[in-house]
Amino acid sequence: MSRAVRRAAACCLATLAAATCSAPLMKLPAGAGTPAPDAADALTQATAACRTVSTLTAEIAVSGSVGGRSLRGRLLAGVASPASARLEAVAPFGQPLFIFVARGDEATLLLPRDDRVLERARPDAVLEAITNVPLDARALRVALTGCASAPDPARSRQLGDDWRVVPDGDGDIYLHRNPHVAPWRLVAAVRRASNTSTWRAEYGNFATGLPLDGLPRTVRLKSVSNNRFDLRLALSQVAINDTLDDGVFTVRVPATATPITLAELQKAGPLSR
């Protein structure tokens, strides 16, 4: 593997910081529970804000670890329904570390500092190669807005008075109601990836007041059974439902850019030296 490819993979997330202690995951209720006849209403309330989001742009402060290695950095993000995304990793100075854009089933990853490019790849494969997180553009939008993907409230479970568990696509979403602070919130999602690994998203610091009322401003993404990733995202400068033109989800590739393959990127691994 060339030195440039190794350096390119490292640049993808390598604004590194000193190691930090990993905070414990949210304690979710366990057990078989009982049928939850009010789950549909709770779900409607918990997803009222995110279901209205067609586009979202934000600045994201990222901290945590990937592959056991600590990191800290800043992303500029834009997502649009149904399946468009842009992530730009901002460097302290100079060119971005990487620019990732996706529309539908195709993604491009540009590494400006190395003048390398990966084109027409699967979005989920590219994001997993550079972050270890198995998300495509649609799932990224769902994760950033704290929303449901394909919920089935008819099969929901009630775990105590203030928890509802709703099957949702490849996992479950957890709705919680603080008895002293209404309303219902979607506070966590447990996802099972195609490789049988499990990971979860946790949401907090919900905005109050329009136009962001009910949207989470902090998101944690963590693999459950290993240290593949543990990322904490703090969203700021959030704007929703602005018109994003096609140029947001395209990237101008320099004529001098040298192609790299997905296999090379995967072999190098996130934060690889």
Image (cartoon, rainbow, N blue to C red):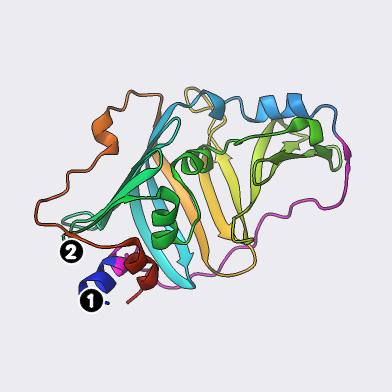
In the picture shown, does residue 19 fall above or below 143? below
Tell me: 4 left or right of 212. Answer: left
Tell me: 242 left or right of 257. Answer: right
Q: Quadrant of residue 21?
A: bottom right
- In this orientation, which residue lies closer to the viewer: 27 or 255? 255
**Callout 1, which amino acid?**
Ser
What label does residue 114 carry, if any?
2
Give how far apart the Cα atoms at labels 1 and 2 are: 12 Å
Whole-percent x, y for residue 77 in the image? 36, 42
What label does residue 46 carry, if any?
none
Tell me: 60 left or right of 158. Answer: left
What is the secondary structure assignment of the residue under circle 1?
loop
In the picture shown, does residue 87 fall above or below 19? above
Q: Residues within 10 Å of mark 1 (few under 14, many from 20)?
A: few
Tell me what residue is drawn at x 40 percent, y 24 percent.
241
What label does residue 2 carry, if any?
1
- In this orientation, which residue lies closer to the viewer: 27 or 54? 54
Would you say the magenta stretch is mainly helix, strand or loop?
Answer: loop
Quadrant where the N terminus is found in the figure: bottom left
What residue span does the magenta drawing correspond to? 9-35
Tell me what residue is drawn at x 23 percent, y 33 percent.
247
- In this orientation, which residue lies closer to the viewer: 167 or 22? 167
Q: Are marks 1 and 2 in contact (CB under 8 Å)?
A: no
- Going from N to C along the chain, the mark reached first, 1 or 2, is 1
What is the secondary structure assignment of the residue under circle 2?
loop
